[in-house]
């Protein structure tokens, strides 16, 4: 018989379940999840963001630029300086039109943050936002 074995057959062969289709299904799901995953680029430094009562969530796909308390401008974990902001934004906007989010530390020099915003706009960014921590009022 093709699909079912005769119970009186004592040929000594172990009966079992074929696991190949299940393994194939798991690999297909794994590939699907890998392909559809969205990766978020982090700035690479931890900043203490100022709080704002009007803070809202923005899109996850964006260009994140951080300004540390010392006034260093960081993108992708590397210090790039103010002069490189315009070229980084221009290069990233060639792939996709996304907003620029400036993560300024609470103690960051105000002039540096303003210059980063200006350079981002000169690089072609249509939407530049400041990252803040949501002010929770209890």
Image: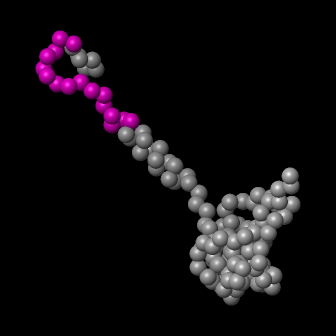
Say above or below: 36 vs 69.
Answer: above
Q: Residue at x 14, y 16 (%)?
A: 10
Residue 11 picture location, percent across and down: 13, 20
Residue 125 picture location, percent across and down: 75, 74
Q: Is residue 104 magenta?
A: no
Count of numbered circles on the image? 0
Among the 4 quarters of the image, the one containing residue 130 = bottom right
Q: Main secondary structure of the magenta part?
A: loop
Question: From where the camera sits, is residue 85 visible?
Answer: no
Q: Residue at x 20, y 25 (%)?
A: 14
Q: Residue at x 72, y 79 (%)?
A: 69
Say above or below: 64 vs 137.
Answer: below
Among the 4 quarters of the image, the one containing residue 71 = bottom right
On-image quarter of the N terminus: top left
Q: Between residue 22 and residue 67, name the one nearer to us.
A: 67
Give the side of residue 16 with respect to residue 54, left or right: left
Q: Is residue 11 magenta?
A: yes
Please report the bounds of the magenta region as a residue range: 7-22
Residue 59 picture location, percent across and down: 72, 59
């Amino acid at each position: 018989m093709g699909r079912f074995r005769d119970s009186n057959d004592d040929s000594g062969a172990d009966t079992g379940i074929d696991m190949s289709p299940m393994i194939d299904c798991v690999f297909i799901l794994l590939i699907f999840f890998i392909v559809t995953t969205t990766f978020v680029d982090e700035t690479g430094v931890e900043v203490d963001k100022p709080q704002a009562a009007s803070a809202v969530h923005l899109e996850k796909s964006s260009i994140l630029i951080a300004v540390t308390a010392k006034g260093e401008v960081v993108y992708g974990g590397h210090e790039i300086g103010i002069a490189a902001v315009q070229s980084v934004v221009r290069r990233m906007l060639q792939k996709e039109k996304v907003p620029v989010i400036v993560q300024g530390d609470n103690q960051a020099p105000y002039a540096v943050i303003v210059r980063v915003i200006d350079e981002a706009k000169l690089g072609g960014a249509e939407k530049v936002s400041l990252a803040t921590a949501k002010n929770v009022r209890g």
